[in-house]
Image (cartoon, rainbow, N blue to C red):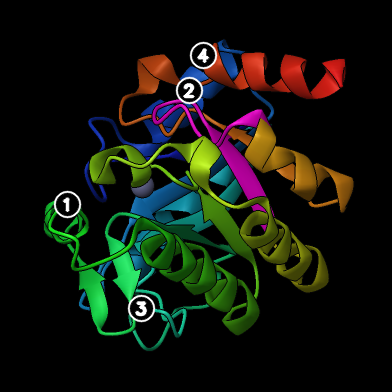
Amino acid sequence: MDMQTHSTFSDGRDSIADNVAAAERAGISRLTCTDHVRRDTDYLPDYVAEIRRVREGTDVEITCGIEAKVLDTSGALDVPDELPDGIEALYAADHQVATPDGPRKPDEIKERIESGELEAGQVLEWIVGATEATVRRYDAVVICHLFSVLPKLGIAEDDVPLELIESLADAAAERGAKIEIDERWSCPSARTIRPFVERGVPLFLSTDSHRSDTIGQYEYALEVLRELSDQ
Ligand SMILES: [Zn+2]
């Protein structure tokens, strides 16, 4: 499988048809399109129609997803108010830090932690709590490259309290959400993933490809799987 890929509909280099052809060559049988959206995105009807068209000519099972950032601790996603029929998965991403007052740039939060104005523990509660709120608020959420924002804040993934991760995993199990291992961002770690696996949350592998020639090429994700199966 490759459950996160980007095309020319957002910031990918290649078309959806090119990505699917590359998936066929790589022996991938399940592929998810996850182009980036924002509140004012207007390409979604064309996107859904193009995925339907490409499905006709392939045996690859294609899911029509979109990726958007978590905006704040209410769990709101940066998506248009009305989504067209045919959107099957919402990828909830930590592209910025979701605070009670909306998204903040990682640089700004890092400075506020360094100056002592904010505690790293508080920021982690916001990030994980906001993601949990998203999982509870929307159907069909995939937790996307969880903790990719932490290196930009100078926080190690190992420093996230396990209780926070377990609370998110509980919500994911209750709501039928999924979690991915993201090759491009090399996260989350086996330690983060384990509580999800223990609760039966489906685990996706994603390259997060922005070009067709990296689709289905894994190293980091396989290491995490090996670490999980060693336990
Ligand atoms: Zn992303």
Between disc 3 and disc 4, the foreground one is 3
The three-letter code of the residue at mark 2 reads Ala
Return the disc, 2 or 3, that comes first in the chain's sequence: 2
Q: Does the residue labelled 3 lie within 8 Å of ligand 1?
A: no
Q: Are marks 2 and 3 in contact (CB under 8 Å)?
A: no
State the SS at label 4: loop
Between disc 1 and disc 2, the foreground one is 1
The magenta stretch is 178-190
Tag shown at residue 217: 4
Residue wearing tag 1: 114
Return the disc, 1 or 4, that comes first in the chain's sequence: 1
Question: Dot 2, crowdedness within 10 Å: few (<14), some or many (≥20)?
Answer: some
Q: How far across and how far down the image is residue 105, in percent?
A: 16, 60
Q: How far across and how far down the image is residue 226, in percent?
A: 75, 14
Residue wearing tag 2: 21
Tag shown at residue 72: 3
State the SS at label 1: helix
Between disc 2 and disc 4, the foreground one is 4
Return the disc, 1 or 2, that comes first in the chain's sequence: 2
Q: Is residue 28 above or below residue 200?
A: above
Q: How far apart are marks 2 and 4 (CA)?
A: 14 Å
Residue drawn 19% across and 61% down? 116
